[in-house]
Image: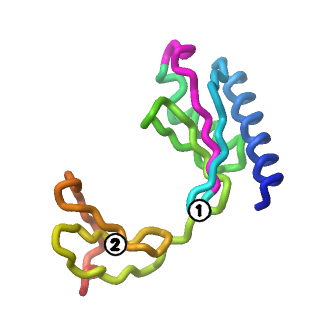
Amino acid sequence: MNRKAKLLVAQAIVHKISAVMQRRGLAPVFAAWFLTEDQGQVWLFGVLDQSLIHKLEDYTRETLLHHLSTAIGGRPIYLSNRSGLRYAVLLSKPPRLPSKVNFPGVQRGQALLGQRYTGQPLRVPWPQLGHLLVTGKTGRGQI
């Protein structure tokens, strides 16, 4: 997708999200919109101005997120609240995850958890790991 196409898609999504919010009686109180690309993934972020929001729950309800997603052609709407409340929309195709990831081996002081979608190993130093839950299908953990 070229730059102009990305901007056109982003503008259409911004318009649709704002229209849905207004139809639902919510003010589209966005402080800013950002279009960014990271490792080949194109993201649109809508930053909500929390000082203008009276009931935060109205902007984070599953029914609203589903309605917004439907309005923009089924693209998922993700909530991000790391530095304020944001809606995140992936504009590019989601990355294809590998069907099989070989065990990355053992490395002193590191938890080798698998592989990122870019193919790079996912390593986390043990002191930074915190809680970890590993799940999988029975019989699929052979080494």
Q: Which residue is mark 1?
A: 94
Residue 73 position within the rendered picture, expressed as x and y whole percent measured from the top left: 71, 49
Residue with the most extreme bottom position:
143
Residue under the image location 43 percent in, 68 percent down: 116
Judging depth in this view, the residue of 114 and 107 nearest the camera is: 107
Q: Nearer the viewer, mark 1 or mark 2?
A: 2
* 64 in relation to 4, above or below: above
Residue 105 inside the magenta-drawn segment: no
Q: Secondary structure at mark 1?
A: loop
Among the two numbered marks 1 and 2 on one chain, the one whose residue lies closer to the N terminus: 1
User: Residue 56: x and y, percent?
Assistant: 48, 21
How far from the left and from the top, in percent, is residue 41? 60, 59
Quadrant of res 64: top right
Identify the residue at horizontal 37%, vertical 73% (top origin): 121
The amino acid on which the numbered mark 2 sits, given as a three-letter code, is Gly
Q: Could you say which quadrant of the image residue 32 lies in?
A: top right
Which residue lies at the image location 72% right of the left edge and 36% below the top edge?
Answer: 14
Say which quadrant the C terminus sits in. Answer: bottom left
Residue at disc 2, secondary structure? strand
Real-space CA distance between mark 1 and mark 2, rounded to the nearest whole angstrom: 19 Å
Residue drawn 57% across the image and 27% down it? 48
Q: Which residue is mark 2?
A: 114
In this view, 103 is above or below 21: below
The dot on residue 116 is none
Region of the chain picked out in magenta, as a range: 42-55
Horizontal side, residue 132 vs residue 37: left or right: left
